[in-house]
Each structure stands twice: as C-alpha cells, then as structure tokens.
Image (spheres, rainbow, N blue to C red):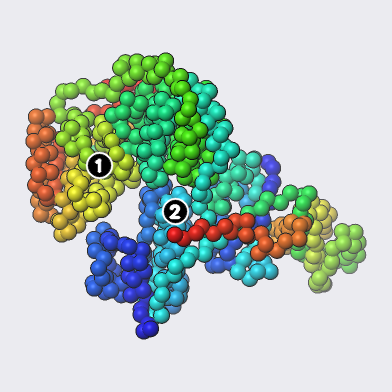
Amino acid sequence: MKKHTLSVLVENKPGVLARISGLFSRRGFNIESLAVGVTEETSISRITIVVSGDDAVLEQVKKQLNKLIDVIHIAELSPYDSVSRELALIKVEVDTTTRSMVMQIVDVFRARIIDVATDSLIVEVTGSKGKIASIQRLLSQFGIKEMVRTGKVALHRMSKTAADTIPEKLQKPEEE
Amino acid sequence: MAEITGAEALIESLENENVEVIFGYPGGSVLPIYDELYDADIRHVLIATAYMDSVPLVAITGQVPRPLIGGDAFQEADITGITLPITKHNYLVKDVHDLPRIIKEAFYIASTGRPGPVLIDIPKDVTTDTLDFTYPQKINLRGYIPPKSADVKHLREAAQLILKSERPVIYAGGGIIISDAAGELLSLAETIMAPVTTTLMGKGAFPDNHPLSIGMPGMHGTKYANYAIQESDIVIAVGVRFDDRVTGKLESFAPNAKIIHIDIDPAEIRKNIRVDVSIVGDAKTALLRLIGLVKESQPRTDPWLDRINKWKQEFPLQYKKDGLKPQYVVESICELYPDAIITTEVGQNQMWAAQYFRCTRPRTFISSGGLGTMGYGFPAAIGAKVGVPDATVIDIAGDGSFQMNSQELATTVQNNVPVVVAILNNGYLGMVRQWQELFFEQRYSATIIEDSVDFVKLAEAYGALGLRVERPEDVKPTLKEAVGSCKPCIIDFIVERTENVSPMVPAGAAINEILDLE
Ligand SMILES: Cc1ncc(C[n+]2csc(CCOP(=O)(O)OP(=O)(O)O)c2C)c(N)n1
Ligand SMILES: [Mg+2]
C-alpha cells in the first residue's frame, strides 16, 4: 500500500497528540510512524506522520485531521519537494574479532559509534528508511541487542517558517 | 474592579451567550456552580448522540480539584478523555483566567460550521479561584475556520448536470434544517420540478404533503423514494451523509445517477460514496446560488413525475386496519395535532412516527438518527417544550425505550412541563423482535418485556396523568384528554404486539430490493 508523509502543524498544548492518535485508531487509519516536536514558534508543534493507504484513505485522513480544532495546518510532503530523515540507535553485540568488522560497516554507511562497552557498541545512523533497513540487516549477523528509531521527520524545501504557513488558513472568521 | 470567582465568571459568561435555560444535576464537584445558579436569572432544569446528529450543545462538567487530578480521587473520571471521540472539541480548564475565553470559544465552535457538542470540564478549585472578569469580544482560533460560501465553479458544474437531467431526485437531510434552508429547498424543487426525499434527520425540511414529496429513503423508507433514487439520472444530495440505513448496498446505490453532494463538512464528501460534483459550504447559500443558475430553464421532468406518481399509487405506505394498530395511533396524532412537535424514541415506534406523521415544518420532528439512542425522545420532548412552551409536544415512544429515562417524569412534574408521552406498547423490544422474527428463526431472546411495568400507575406515582387505550375508537378522545389536561401525561396504547415495520430493505441489499412484511 502507498505511503504518504504528512507534516501537520498543531497547537503546542497538552492532549493534542491524544486527539490525533485517537482519531487514527477510531477511523481505522494506519500510522506507520509519528514524530512530534516543537517548532521555531514555541506555541506550535510539528507532527510528521507517515500513513499508509490509498488516495481515498489519504483524503479522509487529511479532512478528518483538519476538523480537529487544534490542528492548524496540514501539508502532504512528496519526496521531490521535501527532505526527510530518520534516526536509529542500534546496540550491536561484538567481541574482539567482530568489533572491527562492525566498525567498517559503520564507516561505509556514514554512521557513528556513540558508545562502546566490552561486548557491545551503540551505532547511531540517520537516513532514509531504506538505509536504516540495510544497516540493520548487515548488523544483525553480529546480533542486535536492542534498537530504537525516531520515526521519519521531514521538511518542505521551500524557505518558509511554521508561522508563515498559517496565514493561508488564518482568514479569521469575523465576529459580528 | 473587584475579583469574582470562577463559578461567578461561568454564570456571567453564560449570560453573555444569552443562555436562558440549563439542564443539569448537582454533585460534589459542581456545588460552587450550583450555589451561584441559586441567585442567577438562568432557569435550571434537572436532567451523546449530539455528535453523530450534529447538535450544537455546550456541556459543562464538574471535575475534582486540580491537585487531585490523576490520583483516582473520589468520583474522578477522565471525562475529556472519555468524550474525545464523541465531541467536536473539549476543554479541561486548568486556570480560572482561561474560563471566559473557553466559554466564548465553546459556544462558537458548537454552533458554527457543522454544529456539534463541546464539553468544558471545570475542576472544583477553579470554580472557587478568583479573577478580574471581562468577557472577550473576539475569538482567535487559528485551527478552526468553518467553511462559508460555496464554490462557484462547482455550482456551475452542478447546474449543468441539473439542466441536462430528465430524472432528478433531491435527497435532503438534517443539514437543510440546521442551515434554515427549507425555503430554498422548496424553491429549488419547484424550479426544477424534482421529487424530494427527506431522511429521518431531514424530516420537516420539505413538507410531507407536497406533491413533490416522496417521503423517506432507505431501509424503512417508501418504496417510491427508493425506486426513484435507483432509476434517477442525477441525485442532488444536500446536508446528508449517505448513511448505510439510507443507501443499502453502496455499490448498487443510484447506479445510473451522477451525484452532486452539497455539505458544509468537507470530510463528508466522498467519505462513503463516489461523488461527481461536490460543493462544500452552507446549504442555504449553496441552494440560493444554484437556484439562480437553473431558474431560467424549462424543466423536462413531467414523464418522470408521472412514473413516480404511478409508483405512489401502486405502492403506498399501508397497514391492515384490524385491532389497535400503532400506525393508526400515529396517524391520529397527526390528524389531531398536525402542528405538534414530535419527538421519538428508538425502534419500531420511531419508524412508524417517521412514516405516518406528516411534517410540514422544520424543527418539528426530533429523533436520534445516527446512533439510535433509546431514551432520547422523552428528554428531547422536555427540552422542546421548555424551548417552545406554546407548542403541543408529543413523544412517540416504545415501552422499552421510555424506561431508559422514565425518571424524567419527576422533571416534568416538578417544573410543570406538560408533554405527552404516547407509548406504543407492544410488550417487546419490537424492532429487535422484528429482526429475530425475520433473521433468527423467531427465537425471541431477551426481547419480551410484557407486563414489565404499569405505565398508568408509574405516571400517577410521579404526580403525572396516566391514561390507557385498548380500542381504536378510544385513541382520539384520549389524545384530546391528554393534550387538554395541560399536565405531563403518559398514554399507554396497548397495540397489536407483533406488528412489523414495513416495507423493509434487508441489511446489505440494494434499496430497490424492498419487501412488504406482514
Ligand atoms: C440504548 C440502546 N440500547 C439498545 C438498542 C438496540 N435497540 C434498537 S431498537 C430496540 C427496541 C426498542 O424497543 P421499544 O422502545 O419497545 O420500541 P419498539 O421497537 O417496540 O417500538 C433496541 C433494544 C438501542 N438502539 N439503544
Ligand atoms: Mg416495544
């Protein structure tokens, strides 16, 4: 099924994430990943959501999200006009013979080793889902003890700020 | 200016929103609010379907004091969490200074765009905190901009389709009533000479006695409405959401028709069904503009209307008139009190009310559509009577549903709210029994409620009037006695027990596969 990346600006308030995750589960939408963080404008957070589904599902996801009062703006990001990254930390089992082999792989992937113990290493890798999957596959032969991923984050290439994005939607209804 | 408490600020804010009546029930955490109500000008009457049926509602709930939240304190419930999926929006007030703004926003959100319920949860210590009160004039909700006007380009496309059409059907719903567009609907129908079918929520949006009216569509709709939809070349859907009780099997709904969908909620467009032209906006504005675009044309629908009229003659709504029939009770109510406000419970009683009460005005038929909430009709009747004291208000009820909220008899008696409850007493959870008869080999599991309660005595116990009717000839005199008494009243109509709602489209069938039931 097709994957879509949505970049959603929301009010930076408690409970907003619950509204969004609740909406996805109630309407039966599939979340592949979700990453949240505050933007340069502290009253706004950006949520990057990867959803899978056909075009009809995507249309409903966008419209239903838009109905949430705390959702300020939604953009669908295509690979052509946006950049995206994911970060993973992978704890790999090593011994004296395998340590250097792991380090070689880390080098090739331009990943980094950020912690060393006698029998394990922690590797930090950023990149696309595909890149993370490849290094994971290669490292698994040594034994992966633990792993964590952030989910995808993405930004539009155009030079705008979160606050810039809002005004299109901000034609305030005039109070009579 | 002197500081006032959160409770006082709440009451002042409500007065700013021109609230006249509150329905509610006291308890520990709301005591400071009730103490303020004691002195206020707002009338208070002791008493969630609202989301599904787009009802503008502001609900205020009392929460435990802030320091106790999250600690499972006595009577603590995460009401904002619980109501997330069934409210348009909700608030937990954490600072008394936010209270006036939140109330202003809540009323705005509840009543604009597609209306819906908004809940405000107020911790007890917020109601006793103080603030320097001013009620805000402006609203600043950057994430909420209800759509206003309809898209002109799409309106032109819609008009083009309508002008080419020979077999149009207008499918109108609750959106017409919400947007006060009944006049525009009538005018569009008469301009293009198209038949109009109104949904349960749209009942009253178009006069049931108008020659272009074809009644309700769907599962228990009229045969002629369903046939008309299936044979149409264009369906003009306004303020409806293509509920499965209307469409039956989606893939075979209106197979030869182009579909124009007008709705204020963009998420309704293409949610359930393919749409050829979509118009997002207020129904009244959209219809007005659409009329402007089609009014010069000559309608060519005569042969189509002839066909529909033949169906009307051949397949009328009908029932066998032996014994005391529930349909006859509804017809009698309609004959005696055509201008009454009708509320309904849920089940067979609701469908007979929809089929046999002929509404002529909007906001006179109030029923729980999307969720089919048993127990809805009686409190809805109380609300209607309090809102329109001069109207005759009659709850067409079932013996099962009524018992979900029969304690409200105390409300009607204590507050002197003279509504009539017409119980179509069949001794069954009749609608479920009907399904068991048809689809579960007449195994009546848990649906027999015969002799469960004496409704006459129940009414009398509360100080209301209780009447019983067992013969057809007593129906009308008893109705007159009840309405004439100007007291809260229950009439227990002992109706034919195993009467079924007919016609019926079996679940999952196409809507032209509609059957007569005995
Ligand atoms: C709260 C609730 N519980 C259960 C149902 C399922 N249900 C739908 S109709 C019905 C029977 C209602 O019985 P009654 O009020 O006697 O109406 P009748 O169909 O007999 O006219 C039931 C149980 C429901 N809609 N709502
Ligand atoms: Mg019953």
Q: In this view, does B36 lie to the left or right of B144?
A: left
Q: Which residue: 48% across, 64% down?
A: B139
Is any part of residue B271 visible from this angle?
A: no
Given the current orientation, which residue lies at the most extreme bottom position?
Answer: B2
- Give how far apart the Cα atoms at labels 1 and 2 are: 25 Å
Q: Quadrant of residue B227?
A: top left
**Dot 1: chain letter:** B
**Dot 2: chain letter:** B
SS state under label 2: loop
Residue B460, above or below B137: above
Q: Name the residue under label 2.
A: B112
Residue B88 place in picture, x, y as percent: 46, 55
Q: Nearer the viewer, mark 1 or mark 2?
A: 2
Q: Name the residue under label 1.
A: B342
- On residue B493, which mark appears? none
Q: Which of B207 and B35 is in front in this view?
A: B207
Residue B155, above or below B69: above
Q: Which of B416 and A150 is in front in this view?
A: B416
